[in-house]
Amino acid sequence: KVRDVTRSIREYFSQSCELKFVGLSATKLPPQALRLLLQGVAANTHLCGLELDLSSCELRSAGAQVIQDHIFEATAISSLDISDNGLESDMVTLVLSVGRCRSLRHVALGRNFSMKSRALTDVLHRIAQIIQDEECALQSLSVCDSRLKSGTHVLLAALGGRAGLAQLDISGNAIGDTGAKILAKALMSNTTLRTLIWDRNNVTARGFQDVAEALERNFTLQQVCLPLADVTESYRINPDRTKEALHQIQQYLQRNNQRQSEGTELLQGFRTHRAKSGKVRSLCQQLEEQLQHLSHRNVQAFQADVLAAQEVLHAAREFLKLLPSLYEGRKCSSDEDSVNCILAEAAAVLTNEFSRNMQ
């Protein structure tokens, strides 16, 4: 029976075609079962973007070794939650293995940091190095509910470097106002982080104010989940200052989201204009070929039309030279409409002149 069960695990995960999420949280998962699961996923050529939740599965060292052995092969897994698994003694090597996996986009490591200070510092430095590695594929990291306290400073400082994370969850780490100040400093230079989750960190009005001032210079962070527990306590002690800081944070986030929306519209406008400019170039080429053909015939009756067409051709080419600088100027939507009208008008003029030429 045991052999049949183990065979069925591998077969199921190797043959599933539509699987997107596997939730085994709070399941006491034997190492052999985990190995068969990962082997099955590795053998499956149909799956992609799979989310695997192994939190609170009592994996410990044996499970950590299985993950290190097979995570590179299981390229269908894009999200891995291994929080709360008693992995403290294996975190250094496990973090290196996970960080080098090119398929993983999100990793949750929380509640695996109950270790001595020196070992903890080593692990956090390894994590900081990985998220700053240009070849690291991770976009999202969670170390929530780990009570890292000042240890979190290593990760927060890394955000100010080459870190490529788009989302970070540091909730439940008691970073305090000192940690909030380090976070604020990092946000001033960070250009990749889009979402920050940071509740239950003992941050007061002073910490919120530091982050608010930093966001004045950060134009890319779009979502900061409301730290309700910290806000409640801070508001009880210093309501006015807390309210003002949160209002500023909200204003800057709205500004950043608006800029992102305008950037998306600009990109769509650029694609539309580029397609129309291609039409103008094509018409220019056709018109030039016809003008060369007429020049050899030396027909006096067409002379006025030829001159007019040459003027239009010159104007269109000058406009096409100017077009790239208009895009680089990143104009607002009203200016985009103007460019759109000019392109449409140029295309219409060329079409009319070409039709007259053919006649």
Image: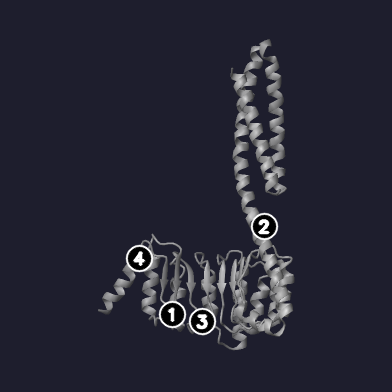
Tag in front: 2 or 4: 2
The numbered disc on residue 14 is 4
- The kind of secondary structure element at disc 3 is helix
Percent coordinates x, y for residue 163 in the rendering: 64, 68
Residue located 51% across and 77% down the image: 94
Q: Between marks 1 and 4, how big is the CA–CA gap?
A: 20 Å
Which residue is nearer to you in this view: 289 or 130?
289
Which residue position is annotated with label 2?
259
Q: Residues within 10 Å of mark 1 (few under 14, many from 20)?
A: many
- Eye-nearest disc, 3 or 4: 4
Residue type at numbered disc 3? Asp
- Of the image marks 1 and 2, the number of the one nearer the N terminus: 1
Q: Which residue is identified by label 3?
A: 90
Identify the mark nearer the N-term, 3 or 1.
1
Instruction: Using the rendered image of the protein, determine whether residue 124 is visible from the camera's viewpoint.
Output: yes
What residue sits 71% from the left and 80% below the top? 239
Q: Give whichever of 271, 288 is nearer the camera.
A: 271
Distance from the alpha carbon under mark 3 to that under mark 1: 10 Å
Inter-mark Cα distance, 2 to 3? 43 Å
Residue bearing the label numbered 1: 63
Amino acid type at circle 4 is Ser
For residue 156, side relative to residue 20 (left or right)? right
Badge 3: few (under 14), some or many (20 or more) residues near its Cα, within 10 Å? some
Determine whether the residue tagged by mark 2 lies in a helix, strand or loop. Answer: helix
Alpha-carbon distance for marks 1 and 2? 45 Å
The amino acid at mark 2 is: Arg
